Amino acid sequence: MKTHKDLLVWQKSIDLVTEIYKLTSQFPSNEIYGLVSQLRRASVSIPSNIAEGAARSSDKEFARFLYIARASAAEVETQLIISENLGYLMSDKSKSKEQLLSISKMLTALINKINQRIK
């Protein structure tokens, strides 16, 4: 691996952030400090933690940051469900759920691979 930018999971996470920003730009203005802020921060946390972990000096630290990224993905998923329940999103029109599932699977696979190297 050259840098975090070479990781497909990081690239897909950046795409997810872009999608989340587009989706939340259509939310009601009264949600700017609520769901909009939460969704944006949690989504940005995913590629940010991948990048930070990749820049660390050990596989153990990298894995720890990947776990945090995966937890942020679960947070985004939860907030998207809440947004759908409130009528801010149409579940069939949001590709972000598919992106999240793919990212979560990729993070799990990468965590498993790194944990195998640690042993």
Image (cartoon, grey):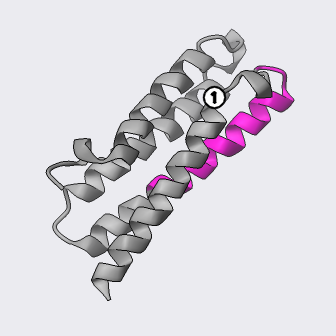
**The residue under label 1 is which amino acid type?**
Lys
Residue 65: image x %, image y %? 37, 60
- In the image, taking residue 40 as reference, residue 58 lies left or right, namely left
Residue 77: image x %, image y %? 66, 43
Residue 107: image x %, image y %? 46, 57
- In the image, taking residue 30 as reference, residue 21 lies left or right, namely left
Is residue 103 something one can see in this rendering? Answer: yes
Q: Is residue 64 above or below residue 39?
A: below
Magenta region:
69-88
The quadrant of the image that shows the N terminus is bottom left
Q: Is residue 39 above or below residue 57?
A: above
- In the image, taking residue 119 as reference, residue 18 lies left or right, namely right
The quadrant of the image that shows the C terminus is bottom left
Is residue 34 something one can see in this rendering? Answer: no
Q: Is residue 42 above or below residue 32?
A: below
Q: Residues within 10 Å of mark 1 (few under 14, many from 20)?
A: few
Q: Which residue is mark 1?
A: 95
- Of 68 and 38, which appears nearest the observer? 68
Q: Is residue 85 magenta?
A: yes
- Residue 110 image-quadrant placement: bottom left
The residue located at (70%, 35%) in the rendering is 80
- Residue 31 image-quadrant placement: top right
Helix, strand or loop for disc 1: loop
Residue 42: image x %, image y %? 52, 40
Q: Main secondary structure of the magenta part?
A: helix
